[in-house]
Image: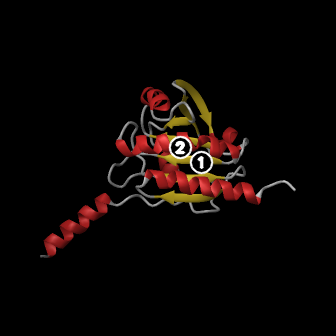
């Protein structure tokens, strides 16, 4: 009986998602990496992106998997709403740049940048790693203010909820920062 409980507990631990260490108000790590937009590879610089307004940085486990494709489609559909609130969407995963070039067109529909983190350094810096699959990202989304502070963080398995929750956070930020 005890061994069955321990075995079950061990399995639950393996299935448990990572819990993001970056709390609201924390300084988000800046990074540079290769990214893709509309099938074309290009450099991505988080510090430069933040100069243009808030960044929705969403981590996803693996390109072309069912949940990640659904999430990319949903972010693509909502990109005009994010842009209307002054925000930029950036997806990031452990996938190589060649894979993300295809994903940026097919799943992201040429709407937003997807960044490659082949060494998982950014995944680690944001404490966005998957406990079950080391080196890959868990499904975590951050909204980062132009000053580099985390405004909002959401973790969960529902890809649509990430889009809805981050859009709501961006819209709230915009409402609080309207010029008189």
* Furthest residue toward top: 40
Distance of label 2 from label 1 (alpha carbons): 10 Å
Please say whether residue 27 is visible from this viewpoint.
Answer: no
Q: Quadrant of residue 13?
A: bottom left
Q: Is residue 63 toward the left or the right of residue 42 in the image?
A: left
Q: Quadrant of residue 45?
A: top right
Q: Earlier in the sequence, mark 2 or mark 1?
A: 1
Horizontal and vertical percent position of residue 103: 45, 32
Residue occupying the point 73% across, 42% down? 51
Q: Which mark is residue 56?
A: 1
Label 2 crowd bin: few (<14), some (14–19), many (20+), radius 10 Å: many
As drawn, the label of residue 75 is 2
Q: Are marks 2 and 1 in contact (CB under 8 Å)?
A: yes
Depth check, front residue: 3 or 17: 17
**Relative height, residue 130 to residue 36 (above, below):** below
**Which residue is found at the position 21% from the left and 67% from the top?**
8
Q: Residue at x 43, y 39 (%)?
A: 94
Observer-nearest residue: 171 or 22? 171
């Amino acid at each position: 009986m005890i061994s069955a409980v321990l075995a079950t507990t061990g399995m639950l631990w393996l299935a448990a998602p990572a819990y993001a260490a970056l709390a609201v108000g924390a300084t988000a790590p800046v990074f540079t990496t290769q990214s893709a937009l509309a099938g074309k590879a290009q450099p991505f610089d988080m510090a430069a992106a933040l100069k243009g307004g808030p960044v929705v940085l969403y981590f996803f486990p693996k390109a072309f998997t069912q949940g990640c494709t659904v999430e990319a489609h949903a972010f693509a559909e909502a990109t005009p709403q994010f842009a209307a609130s002054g925000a930029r969407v950036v997806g990031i995963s452990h996938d190589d740049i060649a894979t993300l070039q295809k994903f940026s067109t097919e799943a992201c529909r040429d709407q937003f940048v997807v960044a490659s983190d082949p060494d998982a350094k950014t995944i680690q810096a944001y404490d966005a790693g998957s406990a079950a699959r080391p080196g890959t990202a868990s499904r975590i989304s951050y909204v980062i203010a132009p000053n580099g502070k985390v405004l909002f963080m959401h973790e969960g398995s529902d890809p649509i909820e990430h889009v809805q929750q981050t859009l709501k956070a961006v819209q709230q930020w915009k409402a609080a920062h309207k010029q008189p």
